Amino acid sequence: MRRTKMIVLGITLVSALGVCAADTFRAGAAKGNITPELGGKIVGGFKPFAAAHVHDDLWVRALVLDDGKTRVAFAVCDLIGISRNVADMARRLVEEETKLPAGHLLVSAVHTHSATSARGSGGLFDLDQKMDAYQIFVARRIADTVRCAINNLAPARVGWGAASEPRHVFNRRWHMKPGTVPMTPLGGTNDVVQFNPGYRNPNLVKPAGPTDPEICFFAVQTPEGKPLALFANYSLHYVGGVRGADISADYFGMFNDRIRQLLGADRQEPPFISIMSNGTSGDINNIDFSKDRQKLPPYAKMRIVANDVAEKVHAAYQTIQWRDHVILGAAFGEIELQLRRPTPEQLAYAKAFLAEQTEASKPNPRRMVYAKRIMEHDRVPATWKFPLQAFRLGDVGIVAIPFEVFCESGLDLKRRSPLKPSFTVELANGCFGYLPTPEQHALGGYETWLGSNRVEIDASNKILDRVLEMLTQLQKAP
Ligand SMILES: [Zn+2]
């Protein structure tokens, strides 16, 4: 009797070590509050203003996956952007405190325009920049939240899918009737297209690029089928329409709230975590300029968008083919790109403009911002290294790019990736401005101006080639 028991125990132990430990797929998720103090500057527009109210809290939402051999983590913050030093500090803390390799953690921002800044106040290419108190707080919260997600690791099944919601994405760059595009704040214009041209502008011709209506997602649930977490990706800049100087996570937060309700995953232990990340929305917003403006109360539009997107994801969620195990992979690399320099004409224009300004002159804030950025770019190094990441989750490919990526690049990645489906998380591990394609650079417009865009004209193609190489390597790995 005793002997039989010991044999059974022995077999159980062998299977526990040999099968479970090595092959059990596990997932853990957590969220941490990163709501700033009131009074900090909300920085979505050209004229920052002090936050006066919290409509809904800002969170970092983290999901950790472990296939028994490889562990990866995703942490998405309800912020307009995060500087590279915040992401680097969070990754370093996570590696020191949890042994999760720094390169296996993706840190990104959703791009809500109703948040104070975790981007710092110095130049983007200033190596000695000191982190401010809020940046340090955010980095610490990211690391702690990833650690909590690791603490929550439990056996899980995984699956993925895609839905489509074309009603809420519009290309915000428009071809205009010849001669009607306004002057740029850099002096003069060769722009063919105009961004955000205004509702029913009589000079509208056609949008300058496509949209991507796809919502890619992956999800984890317990072996018994209880939802644990969901990670979604939609290419929409943000929605907006808040009240006054409110702090809000925009539609991203409302989507997470609604999908939890639709999945019946309220008040779970540990809590269900949904994460809506931003796809490739550098040129995509929620406004149909060919129609009249809809007059809606504050928060109404983002609620509509969040509910519609959540319902589409919920429908596609029902068709998920759940798997007990998939292979995970992660790759981190840097790409060296040339930084743009101002032309002699731009420099002369900016110097003259800044020299004219006095305390009393109250310059146009947009012209002021661009004049300063031109001066900044006269002093930047010739090249700069930018972080790139790629992840594999079974058949799914995910890449992370530290720019506001154009929709065309995202569609290109989806077409060319060896992993299907694949998608891009933008504003990841830093934020270095817009990333238009060379074709869109040729059309001009806000996103292509020096200061909106900071890297060489061909950067989007070089980045795409590199992340596709990284995905190919991950796909080939045994
Ligand atoms: Zn924006």
Image: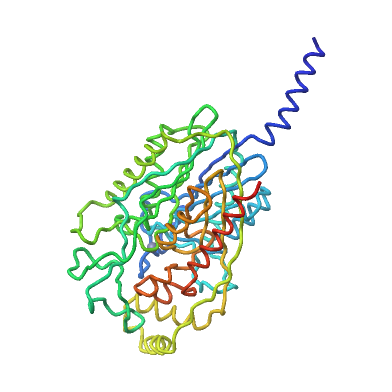
Q: Residue visible at 26% across and 77% down?
A: 182
Specify the quadrant of the image occupied by residue 195. Answer: bottom left
**Which residue, as the protein is rendered here, is positioned at the far top?**
1
Q: Which quarter of the figure is the N terminus placed in?
A: top right
Q: Where is residue 356 shown, x and y percent of the image?
A: 36, 89
Left-right relation of 266 to 68: left
Is residue 312 placed above or below 88 in the rendered structure?
above
Q: Where is residue 398 shown, x and y percent of the image?
A: 52, 52
Task: Tell which of 469 and 311 is nearer to you.
Answer: 469
Q: Where is residue 476 shown, x and y percent of the image?
A: 62, 50
Left-right relation of 438 to 94: left
Quadrant containing ligand 1: bottom left
Q: Residue visible at 56% across and 63% down?
A: 466
Task: Tell which of 435 and 144 is nearer to you.
Answer: 435
Is residue 438 placed above or below 149 in the rendered structure?
below
Is residue 315 placed above or below 168 in the rendered structure?
above
